[in-house]
Amino acid sequence: MDKIVIEGGQPLRGEMRVLGAKNAALPIQCAALLADGPTTLRHVPQLSDVRTMNALLAGLGCEVTGERTLTIHPGGVSDGPLEAPYDLVKTMRASVTVMGPLLARYGRARVSLPGGCAIGARPIDQHLRGLEALGATVTLSHGYVDLAAKRLTGAAFVFDLVTVGGTQNVMMAATLARGTTVLENVAREPEVVELALVLNKMGAKIRGAGTPVIEIEGVDRLSGIDHAILPDRIEAGTFMVGAAITGGDVTLRHAPVDDLHAVIAKMEEAGVLFDVTPEGLRVRGPDELRPIDVTTRPHPGFPTDMQAQIMVLATAARGQSLVTETIFENRFMHVPELCRMGADIVVHGNSAAIRGPTRYSGAEVMATDLRASASLILAGLIAKGRTEVRRVYHLDRGYETIETRLRSIGASIERYHGARG
């Protein structure tokens, strides 16, 4: 098992490119199931989650080739099992996003229920209710959900709560349904907008993505396309925090500035300096960070996937900050590890009171989930001495060779293979 070791105290300076977005790539990989020919995706991030989705698609009968440029041909799917097995779904919850495409194109799907995860239960009831509204028969037994429909029929459906995966699943299913579907209280995240863009390029008729209401007029077929994945806003935000807390000066090429307004606004409130340049987004850390109050919200609010990282910035600020998590329960699992390094953080329910500035001391810490891993790396960048982050397989789900890329802008960081724990 790998570990990452950081010697803190080095400011981040230089330039790096923001890579393709994992949360956009995964549903678009699933969308390839809807096409009657091959789909080619470019700028695909090299992540364990992407490889897991490729394995799932291959198991369904797709021909999957390439890496950074990925081609998915669903020609053999009709002869396959049409099943997302537990062994894959348990490692990556996004596997359930094949439900909508399989049901719409092939009339049936069998998908393992994902169960709980480190940051909360995150049930898929909204996915299933939306698909039932389109005419699917849903049966749950022995830990699996079986879905069937000769052809889905357009309908009006209101999500009880905003769900990115549910919006994507039902939207994909509706592209091949008979008639018009109207989805209300949908997710507005950039990754939902990107998926709608891809589906429309394939021949779908989707309006309203990025607003609370999406309308889909069903079509008879979709075609394979060639598409470049948009840059990852969460990766960009993580490196923005790294530059800020180290007093650095980093330019992020291809940073998706329009998708980062909430994060940039909070960081500016803390004193971080930003400039949009022809090369990208320049981020400069101030002499002293100011405290901030942050509440996670669905897009366009502050993203929950940046909560752990912004907490590290808050620990580096002088004064008291408050971070409130409204999206997922149990998403403060990084707090005990940050406290082991010296942070003063007190959790009350879904809020964390932070008093800074923290003088972090390097320590051995354990990653519990993807974004928690990133927060520990960030804390290590400003800690005195050596920080060892273990269980970094979580990190590899969402950050491609983060140690190499941080080292390229000045961090003292190495990965070691075969570490215990």
Image (cartoon, rainbow, N blue to C red):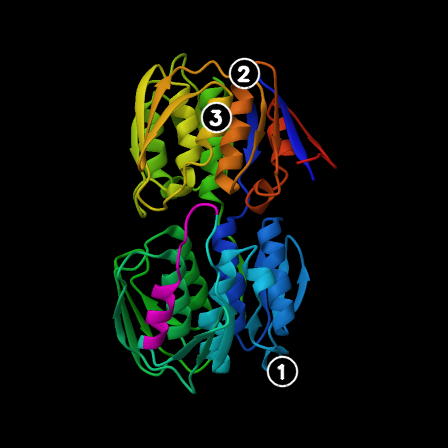
The residue labelled by disc 3 is 338
On the rendered image, what quadrant is the C terminus found in? top right
In the picture shown, does residue 108 fall above or below 354? Answer: below
In the rendered structure, the answer to whether residue 216 lies left or right of residue 11 reads: left
* Residue picked out by circle 1: 79
Residue 122 covered by magenta stretch: yes
Element assignment for label 1? helix
Query: Where is residue 174, by image quadrant?
Result: bottom left
Provide the residue designation for mark 2: 361
Furthest toward the front, the residue is 142
State yes or no: residue 304 in magenta.
no
Between the residue at mark 2 and the residue at mark 3, the CA separation in whole angstroms equals 10 Å
Between 201 and 141, the one lying in front of the other is 141
Q: Nearer the viewer, residue 187 or 40?
A: 187
Q: In the rendering, at what x and y percent does residue 89 appear?
A: 54, 61
- The amino acid sitting under disc 3 is Leu
**Is label 2 in a helix, a strand or a loop?**
loop
**156, above or below 283, in the image:** below
Residue 344 appears at what percent x and percent y?
A: 40, 20
Residue at image location 46% in from the left, 29% down from the top: 336
From the viewer's perspective, tell me whether residue 38 is left or right of residue 305: right
Name above or below for residue 206 compared with residue 147.
Answer: above
Q: Is residue 108 left or right of residue 286?
A: right
Determine if residue 276 is in view: no
First along the sequence among labels 3 and 1: 1
